[in-house]
Amino acid sequence: MNYFKQFFNCLINFMHRLTGLSAQFITFLFVGVLNTAVGYGLYVFFVWLGFNYIGAPFCSTVLGVLFNFKTIGGIVFKSHDNRLIYKFFGVYAIVYVCNVLGLKALELGGIENLYIAGAILVLPLAFLGFILNKKWVFN
C-alpha cells in the first residue's frame, strides 16, 4: 500500500506542477473518478439484483454518497469527523440543484443535448463541490 501512496502522491505533484492547480483540488478530481466508478458499480450491482429504475439509483446514490464522504473527507481533506455528514449531504443537494439549473440554462441557450450539456457542467460542478466542501464542510 505504501508504494501506491507514493505513486499517487508523485502523480498529484506532477499534475500540480503541470497545471498549476492546487494539489488538493487535483486529489479531489482523482477521488471523484474513484467515487464515480464505485457509484456506477453499486448501481450495476443493484440492477443485477433485480432492483427497478427507482430502487437501483436510490440505493446506489445513498451508498455512494456515504462512500464519497469517507473518501473525500479522509483522502482530500484529512478529516474523519462523521458529524460532518449532514453538511456533506447539503453540499450534494446544492450541487444537484445547480446541475438542474445549469442544464435548463444551457437548454434555453440552445444546447438541448443532455449529454453535451452534462459534459459542459462536469468541471464547474466539481469545482463548486470542492469549494463548498472545503469552506463549509471540512473547513
Image (cartoon, grey):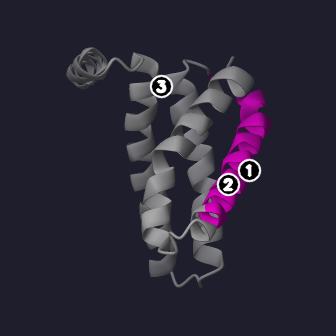
Q: Is residue 91 magenta?
A: yes
Of residue 114 and residue 134, the one placed in the foreground of this image is 114
Predominant secondary structure in magenta? helix
Helix, strand or loop at mark 1: helix
Give the residue displayed 78% in from the left and 29% down from the top. Answer: 83
> Where residue 121 sits in the image (x, y, percent)?
51, 52
User: Mark 2–mark 1 contact, CB under 8 Å?
Assistant: yes
User: What's the mark number on residue 75?
Assistant: 3
Of residue 6 and residue 113, the one placed in the foreground of this image is 113
| Residue position for label 2 | 96
Q: Is residue 42 visible?
A: no
The amino acid on which the numbered mark 1 sits, given as a three-letter code, is Ala
Of residue 32 and residue 117, the one placed in the foreground of this image is 117
Give the residue displayed 75% in from the left and 30% down from the top. Answer: 84
Residue 69 falls left or right of residue 120? right
The amino acid on which the numbered mark 3 sits, given as a three-letter code, is Ile
User: What's the CA distance linking mark 2 and mark 1?
Assistant: 5 Å
Asked if residue 22 is positioned above or below residue 91 in the image, the reply reads above
Mark 3 crowd level (few <14, some 14–19, many ≥20, 10 Å Cα): some
**Span of residues in magenta:** 80-105
Quadrant of res 56: bottom right
Asked if residue 120 is positioned above or below residue 81 in the image, the reply reads below
- Of callouts 2 and 3, which one flags the residue occurring earlier in the amino acid sequence? 3
Pick the quarter of the image with the C terminus: top right
Helix, strand or loop at mark 2: helix
User: What's the CA distance linking mark 3 and mark 1?
Assistant: 22 Å
User: What's the mark number on residue 93?
Assistant: 1
The amino acid on which the numbered mark 2 sits, given as a three-letter code, is Tyr
